[in-house]
Amino acid sequence: MANTNSSYPPFRPERPDLLLTMEPKVFKKEFPTEGQFVEFKTGLSRNQIQETVVAFSNAEGGVILIGVSDEGEIVGRDLDAGTADSLHQVMRDLHDPGRYSLHKLSVGGKQVVVVAVARRQEGFSQTSSGIVRVRKGTRDEPLFGSELQQFINARATRRYELTPVTSEEKVAPELLAELARAFGWGAENLTDRLAEHGFAAQGRLTIAGSLYLTSDPAEVLGKSYVEILRYREDQSVDYDLRVEIRGSLPQQLERAVARINDEVGTELVVLGVRRFDLPRLPPVVVREAVANALAHRSYELNRTPVRIEVRPSAIQIRSPGGLPEPVTVENIRETSAPRNLEVIRTLRLFGLAEDAGRGIDVMEDTMLEEMLDPPQFEDLGHEVVVTLPIRSAVAPAERAWVRELERRGDLEGPDRLVLVHAARGEVLTNAKAREILQMDRPGARAVLQRLRDEGFLEQRGDRGGATYHLAGSLEPPAGLRLGPDELARLIEGLSGDGPITNSDVRLATGLDRWKVRDLLSRLVDEGRLIKTGERRGTRYQKP
């Protein structure tokens, strides 16, 4: 734990969802009083939290401890879903706050909510009413007059995408016509329209204008194209195919997505008389991931293209530059802050990106609905990496069967995974559903009862002894059940990200401990897995 006299951040664990603990005497030593980097709050006063977040963002950062009185006494506050939603909404209402994260801290058995706020590196932050505040000691001081002007002059930045870079003579007429159609412009005063929307300035095309109006923006902006590399092995450093995708920004997006979809391919499944062609990655997820990489990349880093690595188990999309403030990997679903506002806004007008704030939701929700592993996000500072796994603990035949069930009624994201486990013959309880869905007790109960009420599951027993089984009319065809070879391939796929345990395989397949042990032993005997450790420490990994 960092001392409160040091600069931000005193809280930055790798897992902000974990409950940190601290003895009361240690808390008192670390946080004796409010100060330059520490603010106490007993509750969720929207205006007061706004003021302190803005003040920390415009100074050197700090932490807000919610559930602590002005005297430093612990009164307690849980970081439940309602509290988290309220805090995220406060951040959305602000103008350009610094990066932030939420944490749970237990002090003597009472929980404290920690809001860690970083100094804003670019520009400055304002409250929802437009007031600029700066942390000075224990006060969140508003700035006015000459002091405000001096501060803004020191911190203000011009959006880089609006920088003029090349002559308007570079405009390709067919691209100008496409842009005009997207905006609904007439044929008159196009020069004025371009200037109004940031595509031109001072008689020259801006960076945003060059991306949409020149046939090859890389001629003007450096490596502003997409590079696709294909690898035959997950761990290989040598690619066997390299392709450059050039053209205007919409053309790069459409061509890159088409190429990725071709490389990844589909799974053909036949159930009875019905044939299912299942994409191994949902096209809308691929499109949104590439759109974000192109629209939110740092075009100042002009020696690096957007790089897409196609590997057997995953697609990795690398976009130059870190996440724009205040977005972090932890709050990426709740927070939206475009780096290049006109670039992403125009992609939306072309119908090539989701509405503001919906892109990450669409990616995560679609992967869940298709019962695929969720996308993974990394901010490495110099680049953002999005990984789309091309694997799942759910077999293609099971995905096809769930598609067939959707003809009988509406299914929500978590429903599908529960039904797959039921089809494998598992006896479902609230505890089992929580384990499958990584959900709390009320949420798991709601899923089971909804599936029961819709006729997908049958309930046996009541209350704590209730179990749920697949409705008899929905029994999957015999060919849907996974055979030994399919199970073996599934387990090999699970080991692709690192060592696995007997428990990991049981959770993914629904098989009992002894069946899993036999399958793992077979894979070890065949040299397809390596066994290390003993008893509870036993792990299995790829050679």
Image (tube, helix red, strand yellow):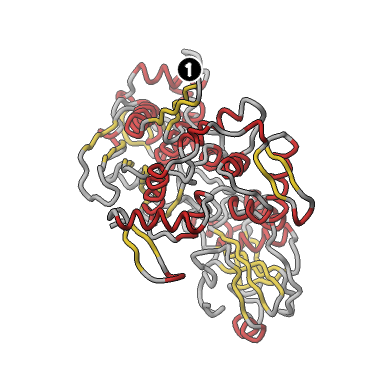
Left or right of residue 483: residue 35 = right
In percent of width and height, residue 163 lies at 39, 39
Left or right of residue 535: residue 20 = right
Residue at 63% from the left image edge and 49% from the top image edge: 427
Q: Quadrant of residue 240?
A: top left
Q: Which of 3 and 128 is in front in this view?
A: 3
Residue at 56% from the left image edge and 38% from the top image edge: 369
Does residue 479 appear in this view? yes
Q: Quadrant of residue 391?
A: top left
Q: Outermost residue toward the top?
A: 187
Q: Mark 1 points at which residue?
A: 181
* Residue type, numbered disc 1: Arg
In percent of width and height, residue 15 lies at 52, 64
Q: Nearer the viewer, residue 175 or 398?
A: 398
Residue at 35% from the left image edge and 47% from the top image edge: 320
Residue at 34% from the left image edge and 27% from the top image edge: 255
